[in-house]
Amino acid sequence: MSVRIGLISDIHVDLNRIQGEEVVTSLLALEAVRRKLDILLLAGDISSDYALSLKTIKALEDASCVRVLFVPGNHDIWNENYPGRTAWESYEALLEHPGNLARGAAALSAGWTAVGDLGWYDFAYGDPSFSRADFKRMSYGKRTWQDKIKSVWDRSTLDMHRLFMERLEKRLIEAAKTNAVKKSANVNFVAAATNAMQDADQAVSLDSGATGQKIIFVTHVVQIREFTVQNPGPQWKYFNAFLGSPEYGELALRYGTKLSVCGHVHHRQQYVRGETRFVCPCLGYVTEWPAPADPEKQIAETLQVFELGPREAIPLTNARGQAAVERDSNA
């Protein structure tokens, strides 16, 4: 049996209001039904309040009857509504939900596995003109990166990154071993990204090769440099440092994951490197959408749908409303 999974990130239900009304949850649930999803996967930043994020996930599940998987985003663990609360407290509270991939790998269908966690950053995307000490301040000009204030861990930024890297690599190793046991020479991967505006599907051929793993790898933070702010001005030359780390993308490639998902940067892009398709499907803030704000259209265009199953891949024409696919020149 194949499974149809929808990918989206950074829905920010507390901030994306139309005339004061929260509409994203209900519209996303409707879109999940319309696109006939089996699974909806959220790559973090559901809201800026862990309790609201959990409430939103339940509402999505109840309204759509679709299984919801997610990883926390940096906003989901913020303490702005809970002065003195640590990031760990919110992170651990989010583990109550069985769909949180931070609890461990999730078995899907047709031999697929989802592996993920929040991830953090190691300053590697920042411009080299800045020093490590500059990045540790997490402030440039009059702007402070809000994780410094609202995400209070018990260790340094770089130590948090290393912690998430170790956890994620361990889970990828376990998933790859499981896949090696189950793998059949006759099983292929089908990735069908459905058209946001039409009923026809967009399918992308990703053949299962010797290194191809039926694993969906998810972080909130950015995994590849191509998803950072490109041609940045002075401010983003600095703040790119807090978007993630290329080490997460290297993990995805090392373990041959077929689909690698992230959010955080509010981009809607896809990038293919070797056998791995990197997807950044961010809804972003209503203030970033074209005017007049149309949340239904934005959700439909952002949600990327893939059909995962043991069938031959049939590539179709890239459809209107879908994110463009860039191919690595070395692929």
Image (spheres, helix red, strand yellow):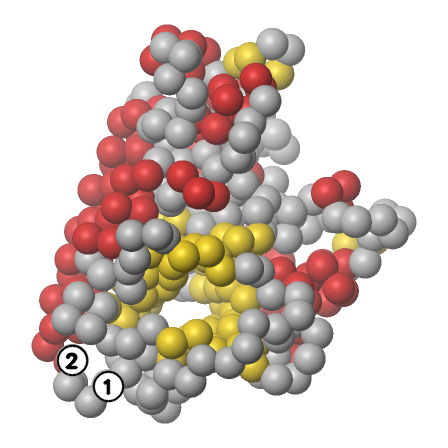
Q: In this view of the protein, which residue sits in the foreground, 253 or 171?
A: 253
Mark 2: amino acid: Lys
- Rendering coords of residue 267 (x, y %): 57, 47
As drawn, 160 above or below 298: above
Left or right: residue 231 versus residue 293 is left
Mark 1: amino acid: Val
As drawn, 314 above or below 112: below
Q: Is residue 113 visible?
A: yes
In the displayed orientation, state which residue is furthest to the front.
329
Q: In this view of the protein, which residue sits in the foreground, 1 or 72?
A: 1
Residue at (16%, 80%) from the top-left corner?
183
Residue at (19%, 53%) from the top-left corner?
254
Q: Which mark is residue 187?
A: 1
- Rendering coords of residue 172 (x, y %): 21, 57
Pointer 2 residue: 183
- Tell me whether the residue at label 2 lies in contact with that at label 1, contact meaning CB atoms closer than 8 angstroms: yes
- Rendering coords of residue 66 (x, y %): 54, 76
As drawn, 239 above or below 271: above
- Rendering coords of residue 235 (x, y %): 58, 19
Left or right: residue 156 versus residue 279 is left
Mark 1 lies on a secondary structure that is loop
Q: Is residue 59 visible?
A: no
Residue at mark 2 to residue at mark 1: CA–CA distance: 7 Å
Q: Quadrant of the C terminus?
A: bottom left
